Image (cartoon, helix red, strand yellow):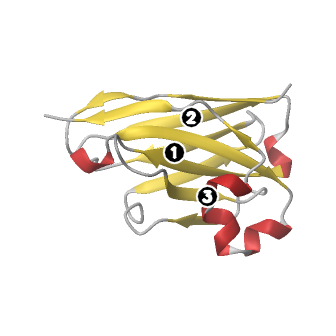
């Protein structure tokens, strides 16, 4: 049974950093691209960023560029989302999602679409507030 579990969320102040982790069981991340999404209260879920199966390529939403970094450790079977200079508008539940293979990654629509992924985590809450 495949399971993705996010961790690392919490309450931080504006300007702080936070590192989220997505751990997998039942699949090997070395064969999967992993995306991060978030959903704020009353808002639609949105794409944050994605890393390909090798970990050698990443793609980010505009709001994440320069502040967020996704990294992949295939030996630990985990994908991290490092978030720096957090802002109140980053408050949301953050989710990771995984999709098998490499061909899909070439499509921006695939990378940014929650429904295009094969597996999804349950989310971790990030709250940025002073």
Up-down relation of residue 88 to residue 110 (above or below): above
Question: Closer to the camera, 7 or 3?
Answer: 3
Q: Which residue is mark 3?
A: 50
Q: Secondary structure at mark 1?
A: strand
Q: Any mark on residue 81, and which?
A: 1
Q: Which residue is mark 2?
A: 21
Circle 2 Cα neighbour tier, 10 Å, few/some/many (<14 / 14–19 / ≥20): many
Question: Closer to the camera, 58 or 46?
Answer: 46
Measuring from the top left, give residue 84's x and y in whole percent. Answer: 34, 49
* Image quarter of the N terminus: top right
Which residue sits at x=56%, y=49%? 36
The answer to whether the residue labelled 2 contacts the one labelled 1, judged by CB atoms less than 8 Å apart, is yes
Measuring from the top left, give residue 38's x and y in whole percent. Answer: 47, 46
CA gap, disc 1 and disc 3: 10 Å
**Sequence order check, earlier mark of 2 and 1:** 2
Measuring from the top left, give residue 7's x and y in whole percent. Answer: 53, 27
Which residue sits at x=67%, y=45%? 97
**Sequence order check, earlier mark of 2 and 3:** 2
Image side of residue 52 versus residue 85, left or right: right
Which callout, 1 or 3, points to the residue nearer the camera?
3
- Figure disc tally: 3
CA gap, disc 2 and disc 3: 13 Å
CA gap, disc 2 and disc 1: 6 Å
Up-down relation of residue 80 to residue 71 (above or below): above
Which residue sits at x=13%, y=34%? 130
Residue, far left: 130
Up-down relation of residue 129 to residue 25 (above or below): below
């Amino acid at each position: 049974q495949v399971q993705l579990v996010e961790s690392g969320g919490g309450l931080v102040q504006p300007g702080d950093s936070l590192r989220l982790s997505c751990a997998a069981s039942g699949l090997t991340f070395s064969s999967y691209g992993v995306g991060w999404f978030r959903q704020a209260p009353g808002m639609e879920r949105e794409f944050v960023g994605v890393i390909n199966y090798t970990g050698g390529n990443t793609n980010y939403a505009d709001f994440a560029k320069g502040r967020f970094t996704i990294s992949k450790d295939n030996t630990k079977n985990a994908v991290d989302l490092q978030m720096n200079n957090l802002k109140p508008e980053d408050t949301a539940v953050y989710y990771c999602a995984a999709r098998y293979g490499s061909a899909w990654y070439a499509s921006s629509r695939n990378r940014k679409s929650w429904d295009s992924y094969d597996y999804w985590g349950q989310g971790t809450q990030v709250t940025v507030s002073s």
